[in-house]
Amino acid sequence: MGRGSSLLPCSLKMDANRRQSGIQQLLAAEQEAQQIVNAARAAKSARLRQAKEEAEREIAEYRAQMEAEFQRKVAESSGDSGANVKRLEQETTEKIEQLKQQAASISPEVIQMLLRHVTTVKN
């Protein structure tokens, strides 16, 4: 019996050591898992930051393209405006010439009519 009782404390010590070892393994696994989670969060944050920067770059490029297109259209329409002004000036000049010709053609008749009315005396 003396022997059996001496085995028991040794067995308890081994169980306690195994439990302690199991706890240490669990703690180590938990730390490793936490490191993996932290690394994943950092990678996700970096990807989000990179995606945001890329989106901002694309937006800036698109904005520059649209601004260039707008400026080109403004330049084209103002060029058309200059052509319209030229055309209107030419049409106006032609119309003035037509009116001068019409006035010159009826001017002698108008002068005769005015002279006749001015020189005729009515009672």
Image (spheres, rainbow, N blue to C red):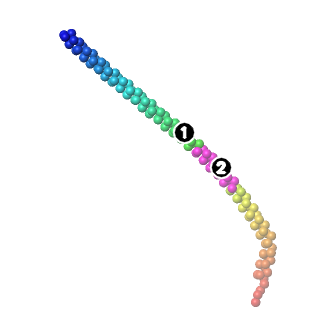
Q: Is residue 53 above or below residue 95?
A: above
* Three-letter residue code for mark 2: Glu
For the point 56% across and 42% down, which residue is it? 62
- Whether pointer 1 and pointer 2 mark residues with C-beta atoms closer than 8 Å, the reply is no
Q: Residues within 10 Å of mark 1 (few under 14, many from 20)?
A: few
* Residue projecting furthest to the top: 3
Q: Residue furthest left?
A: 2
Q: Which residue is mark 2?
A: 76
Could you say which quadrant of the image residue 27 lies in? top left
Question: What secondary structure predominates along the stretch shown in magenta?
Answer: helix
Residue at left offset 75%, top offset 67%: 99
**Range of the magenta residues?**
66-84
Seen from the viewer's position, the closer of residues 94 and 72 is 72
Horizontal and vertical percent position of residue 107: 79, 72
Q: Which mark is in front, 1 or 2? A: 1
In front: 100, or 78? 78
Q: Which residue is mark 1?
A: 58
In this orientation, does residue 72 appear? Answer: yes
The quadrant holding residue 29 is top left
Location of residue 23 (image quadrant) = top left
Residue 74 in magenta stretch: yes
Q: Nearer the viewer, residue 84 or 42?
A: 42
Q: Position of residue 84 (x, y in %)?
A: 69, 56
Secondary structure under badge 1? helix
Distance of mark 1 from mark 2, alpha carbons? 27 Å
